[in-house]
Image (cartoon, helix red, strand yellow):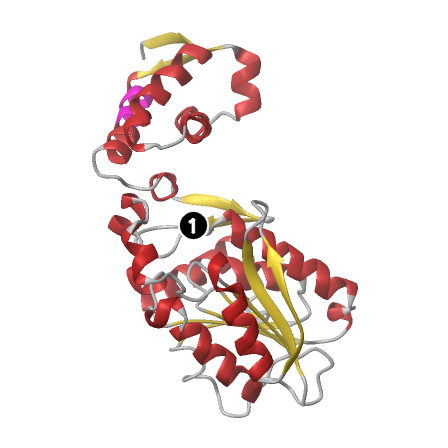
Amino acid sequence: MQKNLYQISSLIKRIEEQLRPVYPHASIATQDAWIILSFVTKTSKASLVAQKNSALDIIQEAALEKIINAIVVQQMPLSYLIGSMPFLNLSITVRPSTLIPRPETEYWCEQLITSLTNKDFGASKRTLLDLCTGSGCIGLSLAKAFPQCMVTAVDIAPEACALAQENAQNNLINQTNITILESDLFTELTPGTFFDVIVANPPYISQEAYDILDPSVKAWEDKKALYADDNGLTCIKNIITQAPFYFSSSSQFRELWIEISHEQADAVTQLFLKRGFDNVRTLQDLAGKNRLVSGAFTL
C-alpha cells in the first residue's frame, strides 16, 4: 500500500491549523494534534518525536481527515472519537452521551485514594458508594485501589450503568469488588445497606454556566449529567441531606466527598456544616480552583 512521508512537525502543524477554528487556545490544539496523530498511527508521542518523519497510508490519511472533520464540523469531542481515555491507572471507554471524565475529577480521586490509604482504609473490608457514576471512572478507581473493599456505583441513566459495567470488565475489576446499580441517587439501594465513604460527581452546573459551555459539550454530553436547578445545587443538596442515613454507625470514617463548581464552595460548605458534618474542607484542582468539598459526619 502506497504511503506518503511527512515531517512530524509539519504534520502536527497541519492538524493544528485545521483544528484552530474550534479551539480557543493554541496549546490545546497542539495537545490534541499529537493525540490524534498518535491514535491514527498507533504510535506514542515519544516515538513520533524520535522518528521525526511519519509515513501515512491511505487508510490512515482517511482516518485522520475523518477525525478532524468530526471535531470541526460536528463539534464532536475528541475523547468520543478515540473511544477511550486514561483515568489514573485505568483505561476508560467513553461514548456519547455519557459524561467524559475530566482531569479535575481524576485529581481529587487520586487525593481521596491517598487520604484513605493513609488512614489504613484498606486494612479491612470497607464499603464505598459512588453516586452519579457515569462511565464508572471514580468507583472503578476505588475498587482497583482497595480490592478487598466493596464498591457500589449507581447512576440514573441505564446507558451509563452499561458503560460502567463494560469498563469494569475491560479493566479486570473483580465483580465481587463492585456492584453497578441503576438508581436515582439512594432510591434503589437495598434497605439496610450502609457505607464507610460516599463520593459523588453530581450534576452541578447552573443554567447561566451551561449557556456558555463549549458547544461540543452541549451538543454531545448529556445535559442531565451536567445541569442542576437552584444554581446547580439541587442534586448536591439532596446528597448532603440523605447521605447521613446511609453511613455505617460503626464506621470510623463516614466521609462524604462531592465535586462542585468553583463558585459553589462557600454555599456547599455551609450545607455540610448545617447537616452536622465536621472537618469540612475544600480541595482545589490543579488550576487552583475550588473543585471539591468533603466532610466527616458526626453521629
Q: Residue at x 46, y 52 (%)?
A: 101
Q: Amino acid at mark 1?
A: Thr
Q: Give how far across and how far down residue 88 sits, in percent.
A: 59, 49
Q: Give how far across and how far down residue 121 sits, in percent.
A: 74, 70
Q: Residue at x 57, y 85 (%)?
A: 244
Q: Is residue 212 left or right of residue 93?
A: left
Q: Is residue 65 left or right of residue 110?
A: left
Q: Is residue 146 left or right of residue 192?
A: right
Assign the magenta stretch its main secondary structure. helix
- Tell me the quadrant of the picture where the C terminus can be found: bottom right
**Quadrant of the rendered structure where residue 55 is?**
top left
Number of numbered discs overlaid on the protein picture? 1
Q: Residue at x 34, y 50 (%)?
A: 95
Q: Secondary structure at mark 1?
A: strand
Circle 1 residues within 10 Å: few <14, some 14–19, many ≥20: many
Instruction: Decide whether residue 278 is among the magenta residues.
Output: no
Q: Can residue 181 be seen in this snapshot?
A: no
Find the magenta span and give its range: 59-65
Q: Nearer the viewer, residue 241 or 249?
A: 241
Q: Which residue is mark 1?
A: 93
